[in-house]
Amino acid sequence: RFTNRLHEPQDAEEMIPNLEKESLVIYDRLYFGKKLVQAHYDHGNYFLFRCRTNACKEIGEFFKDPTKPKTAGFFFKGK
């Protein structure tokens, strides 16, 4: 969707319900947020973010252990 608004996270969240189930969205340079991740879980879609190790506590903890693979699944409590 093309827009001149500067609210990329909000725009992305609004588009998620219209995506095909089990589709994959790749985010590059978009602000990582748990609300956006939760929207993907709620609508049955996959996502891949490029983000910093300090994007959230869970991601920071994941990267502290060098024996883990370089990609991670991210789950909220109850998921």
Image (cartoon, rainbow, N blue to C red):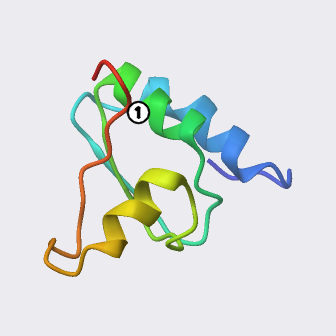
Numbered disc 1: secondary structure: helix
Name the residue beneath numbered marker 1: 40
- Number of numbered markers: 1
Neighbours of disc 1 within 10 Å: few (<14), some (14-19), many (20+): many
Where residue 6 sits in the image (x, y, percent)? 85, 55
In the rendered image, which quarter is residue 34 located in? top right
Q: Is residue 73 above or below residue 61?
A: above
Which residue is found at the position 36% from the left and 28% from the top? 41
Q: Nearer the viewer, residue 54 or 18?
A: 54
Q: Nearer the viewer, residue 6 or 36?
A: 36
In the rendered image, which quarter is residue 29 located in? bottom right
Where residue 18 sits in the image (x, y, percent)? 45, 26
Which residue is found at the position 57% from the left and 61% from the top? 55
Q: Nearer the viewer, residue 40 or 66?
A: 66
Q: Determine whether, in the image, residue 71 is placed left or right of residue 19.
A: left
Q: Residue furthest right?
A: 5
Where residue 1 sits in the image (x, y, percent)? 61, 47
